[in-house]
C-alpha cells in the first residue's frame, strides 16, 4: 500500500469516527431533551387571601399557561383571610402566600415561622378608600365603623397606614373595626350603611362611585412606602426547592409582560372578570388599568416598605419592635434574574 493510499484510509477512518461522534452526541442530546420534557411538573399551592385586581397576575399566569411553561403545576387557593392562609403555610399545606406585610404575616414570623419575602410586585400602598355619602374628609371617620377583612390582615394594614398618614388613631378617635369579609361584601356594606368606609380594590370602588359613593382617597397618590403584593414563602422551602421558587417567579414575570402588552387587553380583562366574578367584562376596566400601571418587572421586595409596616405595627404591639426588615427579605433569585436580563 503506497503512502497516498494510507493517507486516504486514515482520512476515511477519521471521518467515520467523527460521524459516529456526531450521531452519539445527537442521540444523547435528544434523550436529555426527552428526559427534561418528561420530568413531572412540580406541584405548588399558592394561597392569596385578598379578592381584588392585585391577584390578577396569578390568574393571568395560570390562564395563559405561564406556570406550565415553567414546569410548575400551580393550584391557586383563595383563602377567606390571611390568618387561615398562614395556618396553611405553617402546616405545609401551601408553599407560597401571595399578599402583603401585615400583622398576620409579620406576626407569624414573630411567633417562629421561618418566613421570607422573595419577590415584590407592588411596592407602595395602593387601593381606594371608599366611604358613605356623608363622609367628606378623613376626620369624618372618627367615631365610625370601618370594615376590614380581618384584624391584623392585609386590608387592616392598608387601613392603619392610611390612618397613620391622616393622623388618625383608632383607639383615641373611637373608631370601630368590623370584620365584614372580602372586597365585594365590604362594598355592599358601604352602600347599605353598615359601615362608614373601607379600603377597597379599584374595581369595586369604581362601581361604588358610579352609584354616587365617594372615594375619600386613592392611597397610591399618597406615596406611602409599603410592601404590598409580594411572594412569601418559608426559608426551609426556599432552601429545598430553589428551582421551583425561581420558576414561579419567572412565570409571574411572563405574566407582567403579557399584562403590559396593549394587544393582550381583552385576554387580561377576561381573566380579571372571571377572578372577580363580574357579570360584565367591562366592569374590570379599572382593575385592568391598575394592573398595567402598578405591576413592576423590577420585582425586588422593598425593605423600606416592610420597615414602615413594622413601625406602624409596633404602635399596636411591642412584639413587632424586635423585627428587622432586612431579615425578612431574600432577594438572591431576583438578583440572579436581573443579572440574566430577565428585567
Image (cartoon, rainbow, N blue to C red):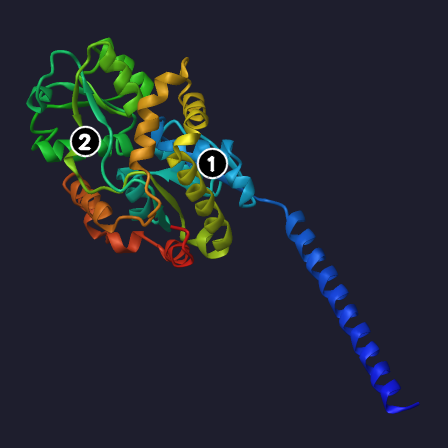
Residue 285 spot, x, y in % from top left = 34, 22
Residue 26 spot, x, y in % from top left = 72, 61
Residue at 49%, 48% in the rendered image: 247
Residue 147 spot, x, y in % from top left = 23, 21
Question: Foreground residue, 4 or 220?
Answer: 4
Bin the neighbour count of mark 1 within 10 Å (Cα to Cα): few under 14, some 14-19, many 20 and up.
Answer: many
As displayed, is residue 143 above or below residue 109?
Answer: above
Q: Secondary structure at mark 2?
A: helix
**Whole-number angstrom distance, CA of label 2 to CA of label 1:** 27 Å
Residue at the extreme bottom: 2
Q: Secondary structure at mark 1?
A: helix
Q: Report whether residue 185 is seen.
A: yes
Q: Which residue is mark 2?
A: 219
Residue 159 spot, x, y in % from top left = 20, 30
Find residue 132 and name its label. none
Residue at 11%, 16% in the rendered image: 135
Q: Which residue is mark 1?
A: 61
Going by the image, does 288 lie left or right of 312?
Answer: right
Residue at 35%, 55% in the rendered image: 331
Going by the image, does 281 lie left or right of 102?
Answer: right
Amino acid at each position: 500500500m503506497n503512502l497516498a493510499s494510507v493517507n486516504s484510509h486514515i482520512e476515511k477512518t477519521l471521518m467515520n469516527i467523527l460521524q459516529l461522534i456526531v450521531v452519539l452526541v445527537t442521540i444523547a442530546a435528544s434523550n436529555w431533551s426527552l428526559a427534561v420534557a418528561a420530568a413531572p411538573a412540580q406541584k405548588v399551592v399558592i394561597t392569596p387571601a385578598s379578592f381584588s385586581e392585585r391577584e390578577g397576575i396569578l390568574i393571568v399566569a395560570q390562564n395563559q399557561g405561564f406556570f406550565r411553561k415553567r414546569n410548575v403545576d400551580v393550584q391557586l387557593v383563595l383563602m377567606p383571610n390571611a390568618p387561615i392562609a398562614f395556618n396553611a403555610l405553617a402546616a405545609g399545606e401551601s408553599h407560597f402566600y401571595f399578599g402583603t406585610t401585615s400583622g398576620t404575616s409579620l406576626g407569624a414570623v414573630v411567633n417562629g415561622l421561618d418566613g421570607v419575602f422573595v419577590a415584590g410586585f407592588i411596592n407602595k400602598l395602593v387601593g381606594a378608600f371608599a366611604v358613605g355619602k356623608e363622609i367628606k374628609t378623613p376626620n369624618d371617620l372618627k367615631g365610625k365603623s370601618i370594615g376590614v377583612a380581618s384584624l391584623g390582615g392585609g386590608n387592616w394594614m392598608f387601613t392603619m397606614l392610611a390612618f397613620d398618614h391622616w393622623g388618625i388613631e383608632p383607639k383615641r378617635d373611637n373608631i370601630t373595626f368590623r370584620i365584614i369579609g372580602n372586597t365585594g361584601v365590604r362594598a355592599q356594606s358601604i352602600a347599605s350603611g353598615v359601615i362608614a368606609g373601607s379600603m377597597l380594590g379599584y374595581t369595586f370602588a369604581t362601581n361604588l362611585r358610579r352609584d354616587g359613593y365617594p372615594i375619600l382617597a386613592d392611597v397610591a397618590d399618597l406615596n406611602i412606602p409599603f410592601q404590598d403584593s409580594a411572594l412569601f414563602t418559608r426559608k426551609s422551602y426556599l432552601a429545598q426547592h430553589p428551582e421551583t421558587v425561581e420558576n414561579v417567579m419567572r412565570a409571574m414575570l411572563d405574566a407582567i409582560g403579557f399584562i403590559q402588552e396593549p394587544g393582550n387587553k381583552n385576554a387580561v380583562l377576561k381573566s380579571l372578570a372571571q377572578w372577580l366574578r363580574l357579570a360584565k367584562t367591562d366592569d374590570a376596566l379599572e382593575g385592568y388599568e391598575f394592573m398595567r400601571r402598578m405591576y413592576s418587572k423590577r420585582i425586588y421586595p422593598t425593605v423600606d416598605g416592610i420597615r414602615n409596616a413594622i413601625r406602624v405595627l409596633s404602635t399596636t404591639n411591642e412584639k413587632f419592635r424586635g423585627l428587622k426588615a432586612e431579615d425578612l427579605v431574600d432577594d438572591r433569585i431576583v438578583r440572579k434574574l436581573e443579572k440574566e436580563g430577565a428585567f
